[in-house]
């Protein structure tokens, strides 16, 4: 083999290696084989999950959203792809929602919680008394006093409408996990096919949450870790000092609870009713109108107008005993907004929404 | 030109001595000297150094409402002024941390790749068209070493160009805002040391990214005699990549596209820094580097000098 | 057409056979996309000789030279340069070879000196500390010491050519290959190139110089290779070539027409010349020609063997004489420019 041939062979191999590398990096991660794990019953899995304490970890979670949500103004909350989560194994956590060129950072530790928005440069703090915190902890612990009991209750509640099972294993973020599957009973009139939760075998931390709709093989909504490292985290991660130049708002926990209650009194919560049970539950209530949603005040009216225009564009007209309205469908369900300002929504087909509205009219 | 018998070299002995090569450092020094004597290189580098200054001053003026010492402007002018411009600049002002990084990211889209493409175009195609490549081949410099020296030259241009952008941005930031505003996107205040290592990583990453483009440009350069073909080729490739990146139906293709790594530079402003995106980008750049270099090597060893 | 040789410095040419060869090719062939540029070239460059490679533009001179120097991969054939195979071992031999190929190639934004320093850096035979000195010496030798710091862009055509020559002479060489070295030089520059070639020759350096100008080759070379359409049509010592070809006897006679007729009757080819006749003596001995003429009663004033000029030999060797002469005349003005 002459030097020229050698050079060409070397170059050819280089090109092959480079292209193979690119192809490799384009493969979806987590294509590992499903791990082999000891068999476990659904009840036992739920119980052990409830009993488990999250260990200290650092992870990256990704959201894949194929819900087909219309681009409604004010839903930026879902406008992210990646979340970084840090947990100290106790009560401190740090969550960073990464956006293209900005970030929402939430830091919670034993006595305060911060939310920092790099786009607005605002830092919101929530503080509480040691007593409150103690009480809250006690309350939580009481509720979870007997995990096996709680698990049994939860499963008991689900059983009439769902089949619940451990369906094999999965590898999530490189970790072995059980797949807990919730399937609606055939009698349920829902658009959902199943919901799966992947639970880490070792730590019993839920690693992934997938929602499947009828007629699709890929999840319509998937939130799960793509990376997870168990281990102690730097204590600095759970401290937050607002930077110079940021707008800082501090709220006491008591005030916050009161505000929340006020909102519920005057707002949406009070006027909501549910129709049906289990998977075909439909929520019926007043459509959000001016001033009733959130605290954004000034631009709510504007938003309401936007909403009307948008509904006309994306919805189809629907009529029934209740009158007439607009039906909007997304991958996992739909909603009917009536002309007289009511709304019915659920993970159900259109007719179930209409029936629910009709039913509330008859009452 | 009088008779100069004494300057005529003596004829070496009839036996050929053992193989000898000019030391590599001498070639590298000659190459770097040549690159930085080229007026075109100097003009482009000067432009790259000035752009962060202009950006910084513009952002500072916008944020500070003209920088008037007395607050006589109309109320509300402050927040209203922050609507324009890339969000990264607006949110964190012309600080000595964000300005250099933001400038580097912006210039990595087009200006820096074109600078590297120009250097690569001059390195082989330009030399070929001047007939100067022959001089080194005849010395002789083996074709493999020639490619090595030429790549090193492009690497130096990539490093100097990115370093210059960051240094200029940092100095501008320090002059405009002092050490204020060294804040990460996650809201943490950063020490000067923190800022410096992050900027160092940014320069290293940018250099590697640019070198991947440089390798592809060198491959084009080995196939042509016209340096402009190289610049136009790289420009075309970048534009096509960016257009393909906008088409979500082709998202299976996106991991193959070099510029899809660029956004991960933002992660250097987050705290703690997440290296996943940067590592993935570096791996992708490495693949391009290997492909480009292999193509260039194949061509340069077989082409006629 | 001058036949003066450079100051008589050129010694008698040695015959190619039995002499060590500085360069040799066997069956050299190069095909560019179906076009045969060089075909079956068996070139022999004796050590210590000054070999002129003569041929019209497009005759394959430059392609042959580029193959010799390892710049171009031959399609077929073997090359040996100073005893080692090329291009396989080109890196061993090329340090000892200086070359100026296809005109000088330099960077316009660098000075002449900077350009040379750039090339000197790549010369294996020069140590780091010798670079400056070698560049100065080379500039001095070609008469560019005064213009060393001027940008190459500002050089005249002649100065550019000289700088190219200087780059070929940066290091001590055993073989110097010059492709059209006098292209663009004024007569004084041409003389200087000739002097440099003569000096190299005096020191025992082998020189291969290509030219489409006969005068150039006649003036400087000990050996000649004539190429036409990619094929060697003649090669050998200059003196042998000058005397070879169909030998002619020039006979001065008052009655040329009658003499030609007489010779043709005896099947001896002859034709009229201005002051007599020319007789082809390839097959007939000169004595027999004179005898035939005298017997027929023709008066023979003088008879001598004609020593052909190289131009005639060259024209005879290359097949399409008309093309070649036209080419040469067309190229002529460029020399003076």
Image: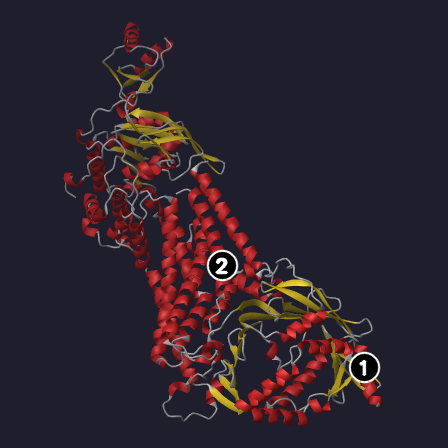
The image quadrant of residue A313 is bottom right
Q: What chain letter is assigned to the residue under label 2? A: B
Q: Quadrant of the C terminus of chain A?
A: bottom right
- Nearer to me, B3 or C44: C44
Determine whether, in the image, residue B169 is placed left or right of residue C3: right
Name the residue rendered at 46%, 39% in the picture.
A5
Please give the residue where the numbered disc 1 appears in the rendered image: A354
Residue B283's label in the rendered image is: 2
| Rendered view: B144 above or below A198 | above
The x, y position of residue C221, in whole percent, is: 26, 30
Real-space CA distance between mark 2 and mark 1, rounded to the nearest whole angstrom: 54 Å
- Nearer to me, C286 or A309: A309
Residue B118 appearing in the image = yes
SS of the residue at dot 2?
helix
SS of the residue at dot 1?
helix
- Nearer to me, A171 or C255: A171
């Amino acid at each position: 083999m002459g030097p020229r041939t050698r050079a060409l062979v070397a170059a050819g191999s280089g090109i092959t290696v480079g292209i193979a590398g690119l192809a490799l990096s384009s493969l979806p991660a987590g294509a590992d084989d499903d791990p082999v794990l000891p068999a476990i019953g659904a009840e036992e899995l739920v119980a052990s999950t409830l009993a488990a304490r999250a260990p200290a970890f650092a992870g990256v979670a990704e959201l894949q959203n194929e819900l087909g949500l219309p681009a409604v103004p004010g839903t930026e909350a879902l406008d992210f792809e990646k979340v970084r989560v840090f947990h100290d194994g106790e009560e401190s956590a740090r969550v960073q929602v990464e956006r293209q060129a900005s970030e929402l950072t939430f830091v919670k530790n034993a006595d305060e919680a911060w939310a920092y928005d790099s786009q607005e440069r605002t830092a919101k703090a929530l503080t509480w008394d040691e007593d409150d915190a103690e009480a809250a902890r006690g309350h939580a612990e009481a509720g979870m006093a007997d995990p096996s009991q709680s698990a049994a209750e939860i499963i008991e509640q689900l059983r009439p409408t769902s089949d619940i099972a451990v369906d094999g294993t999965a590898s999530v973020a490189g970790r072995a996990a059980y797949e807990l599957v919730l399937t609606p009973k055939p009698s349920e009139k829902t658009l959902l096919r199943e919901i799966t939760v992947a639970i880490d075998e070792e730590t019993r931390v839920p690693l992934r949450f997938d929602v499947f709709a009828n007629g699709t093989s890929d999840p319509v909504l998937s939130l799960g870790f793509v990376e997870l490292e168990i281990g102690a985290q730097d204590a600095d991660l759970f401290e937050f000092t607002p930077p110079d130049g940021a707008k800082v708002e501090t709220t006491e926990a008591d005030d916050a609870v009161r505000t929340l209650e006020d909102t519920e009194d005057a707002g949406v919560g009070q006027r909501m009713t549910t129709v049906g049970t289990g998977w075909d539950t439909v929520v019926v209530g007043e459509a959000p109108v001016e001033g009733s949603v959130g605290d954004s005040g000034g631009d709510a009216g504007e938003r309401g107008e936007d909403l009307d225009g948008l509904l006309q564009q994306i919805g189809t007209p629907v009529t029934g005993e209740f009158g007439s309205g607009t039906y909007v469908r997304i991958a996992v369900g739909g909603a009917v907004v009536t002309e007289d300002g009511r709304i019915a929504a659920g993970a159900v087909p259109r007719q179930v929404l209409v029936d629910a509205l009709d039913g509330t009219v008859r009452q | 030109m009088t008779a100069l018998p004494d300057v005529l070299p003596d004829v070496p002995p009839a036996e050929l001595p053992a193989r000898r090569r000019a030391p590599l450092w001498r070639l590298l020094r000659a190459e770097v000297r040549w690159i930085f004597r080229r007026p075109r290189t100097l003009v482009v580098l000067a432009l790259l150094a000035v752009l962060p200054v202009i950006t910084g001053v513009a952002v500072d003026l916008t944020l500070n409402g003209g920088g008037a010492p007395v607050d006589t402007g109309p109320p509300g002018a402050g927040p209203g002024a922050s609507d324009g411009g890339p969000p990264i600049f607006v949110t964190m002002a012309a600080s000595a941390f964000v300005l250099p990084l933001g400038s580097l990211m912006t210039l990595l889209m087009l200006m820096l790749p074109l600078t590297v493409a120009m250097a690569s175009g001059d390195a082989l195609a330009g030399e070929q068209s001047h007939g100067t490549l022959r001089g080194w081949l005849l010395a002789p410099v083996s074709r493999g070493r020639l490619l090595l020296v030429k790549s090193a030259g492009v690497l130096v241009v990539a490093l100097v160009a990115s370093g210059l952008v960051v240094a200029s941005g940092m100095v501008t930031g320090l002059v405009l805002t002092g050490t204020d505003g060294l804040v990460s996107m996650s809201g943490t205040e950063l020490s000067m040391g923190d800022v410096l290592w992050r900027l160092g990583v940014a320069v290293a990453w940018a250099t590697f990214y640019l070198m991947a483009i440089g390798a592809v440009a060198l491959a084009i350069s080995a196939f042509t005699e016209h340096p402009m073909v190289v610049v136009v080729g790289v420009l075309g490739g970048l534009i096509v990549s960016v257009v393909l990146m906008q088409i979500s139906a082709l998202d299976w293709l996106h991991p193959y596209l070099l510029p899809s790594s660029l956004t991960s530079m933002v992660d250097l402003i987050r705290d703690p820094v997440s290296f996943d995106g940067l590592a993935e980008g570096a791996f992708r750049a490495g693949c391009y580097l290997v492909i480009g270099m292999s193509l260039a090597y194949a061509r340069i060893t077989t082409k006629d000098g | 057409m001058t036949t003066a040789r450079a100051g008589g410095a050129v010694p008698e040419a040695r015959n190619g056979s039995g002499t060590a060869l500085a360069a040799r090719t066997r069956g050299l062939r190069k095909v560019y996309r179906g076009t045969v540029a060089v075909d079956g070239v068996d070139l022999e460059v004796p050590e210590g000789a000054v070999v002129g490679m003569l041929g019209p533009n497009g005759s394959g001179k430059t392609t042959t030279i580029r193959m010799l120097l390892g710049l171009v991969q031959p399609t077929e054939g073997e090359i040996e340069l100073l005893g080692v195979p090329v291009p396989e071992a080109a890196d061993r031999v090329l340090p000892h070879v200086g070359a100026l190929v296809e005109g000088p190639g330099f960077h316009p934004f660098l000075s002449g000196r900077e350009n040379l320093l750039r090339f000197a850096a790549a010369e294996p035979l020069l140590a780091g500390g010798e670079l400056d000195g070698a560049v100065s010496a080379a500039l001095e030798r070609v008469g560019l010491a005064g213009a060393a710091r001027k940008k190459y862009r500002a050089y005249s055509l002649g100065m550019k050519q000289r700088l190219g020559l200087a780059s070929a002479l940066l290091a001590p060489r055993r073989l110097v290959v010059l492709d059209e070295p006098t292209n663009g030089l004024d007569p004084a520059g041409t003389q200087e190139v000739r002097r440099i070639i003569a000096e190299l020759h005096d020191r025992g350096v082998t020189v291969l110089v290509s030219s489409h100008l006969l005068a150039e080759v006649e003036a400087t070379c000990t050996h000649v290779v004539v190429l036409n359409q990619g094929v060697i049509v003649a090669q050998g010592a200059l003196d042998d070539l000058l005397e070879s070809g169909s030998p002619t006897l020039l006979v001065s006679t008052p009655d040329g027409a009658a003499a030609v007729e007489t010779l043709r009757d005896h099947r001896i080819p002859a034709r009229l010349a201005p002051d007599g006749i020319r007789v082809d003596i390839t097959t007939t001995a000169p004595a027999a020609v004179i005898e035939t003429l005298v017997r027929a009663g023709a008066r023979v004033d003088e008879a001598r063997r004609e020593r052909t000029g190289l131009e005639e030999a060259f024209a005879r060797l290359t097949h399409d004489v008309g093309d070649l002469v036209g080419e040469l005349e067309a190229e002529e003005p460029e020399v003076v420019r």
